[in-house]
Amino acid sequence: MSHIIEVEGLTKTFKGLKAVNNVSLFAEEGRITGMIGPNGAGKSTTFNMICGYYPPTSGRIRFRGQDITGKRAYEFADMGIARTFQIMKPLGNLSVLDNVASSAFFGRHKAKNITQAREIAEGILEFTGLAQKRNVLARSMGTPDQKRLEMARALATKPDMLFLDEVMAGLNPAETETAIDLIRRINSQGVTIFLIEHIMKAVVSLCEKVVVLHHGEKIAEGTPEQVMNDPYVMEVYLGVKKNA
Ligand SMILES: Nc1ncnc2c1ncn2[C@@H]1O[C@H](COP(=O)(O)OP(=O)(O)OP(=O)(O)O)[C@@H](O)[C@H]1O
Ligand SMILES: [Mg+2]
């Protein structure tokens, strides 16, 4: 099984605070890998470094064996890497259709003009269940639709690898089921997925492997079942001591 992403000794310091400390991990091609950990554990910071949002203080990132540390965000789209943001970043004054169409100019679709970009976007709106909202302004939508729009915009770059930062936060159980189904459908099209999620039900049903962060450090990794039964994970993540 090949490792599409490999990270070695990733560290990020913000004004003396080590938000991420010496984290090494990998994601297997074609699979869904999860990342969990308490608030402030360094999950989003790890994704931000891997996706080129800002450079690591130290450490290396490899994509398909190639060192991509220090590359810029737009270069990631060209390589086939896309991500969503925990705090949604829609182009608020544009319609849902044009939010997705704008992404189709980047990455590997590289639309030649707006007509072609909108054609690509229409297909993605169908796939993500947003077609009926194509003319709605992004900023007027609620959280569930904005989360879905984040995924649709990422997909419009035609990624091989998709990073999802809490795309199920704020969703009710029915909306969570729909999101789980969408993530599974994206994966079955051959897209490798790495997702940060607090909703354990989603992690258990989607992820073959989970990485656990705490205070910026990787404290466990394994199947969802393995990490949830790890005494240290239970202690720091769930706040309980096993057999205590
Ligand atoms: N740009 C920044 N400048 C300064 N400190 C930051 C910055 N981004 C994150 N931090 C700090 O780094 C630590 C890790 O934050 P991060 O957002 O990565 O956590 P997280 O695991 O994603 O948490 P959550 O589950 O709440 O999203 C926190 O202490 C946070 O306050
Ligand atoms: Mg976060």
Image (tube, grey):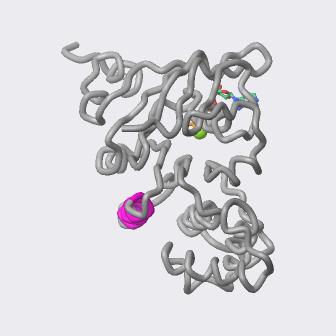
* Residue drawn 38% across the image and 34% down it: 210
Q: Is residue 103 left or right of residue 207?
A: right
Q: Residue 35: x percent and y percent?
A: 46, 36
Of the four image quadrants, the one with ligand 2 is top right
The image quadrant that residue 95 belongs to is: bottom right
Could you tell me what secondary structure mostly forms the magenta stretch?
helix
Nearer to the camera, 88 or 26: 26
Q: Residue 242: x percent and y percent?
A: 24, 17
Q: Is residue 12 magenta?
A: no
Q: Is residue 144 left or right of residue 211?
A: right
Nearer to the camera, 108 or 227: 108
* Residue drawn 46% across the image and 30% down it: 37
Q: Residue furthest front?
A: 65
Q: How many callouts does the rendering have?
A: 0
Can residue 12 be seen in the rendering of this structure?
Answer: yes
* Residue drawn 73% across the image and 77% down it: 98
* Residue drawn 48% across the image and 44% down it: 194
Q: Residue 123: x percent and y percent?
A: 56, 80
Q: Residue 166: x percent and y percent?
A: 52, 48
36 relative to 133, above or below = above
The image quadrant that residue 135 belongs to is: bottom right
183 relative to 71, above or below = below
Nearer to the camera, 2 or 100: 2
104 relative to 3, above or below = below
Can residue 216 be seen in the rendering of this structure?
Answer: no
65 relative to 189, above or below = above
**What is the span of residues highlighted in magenta in the rendered image?**
175-187
- Give the quarter of the figure containing the N terminus: top left
Q: Is residue 58 left or right of residue 191?
A: right
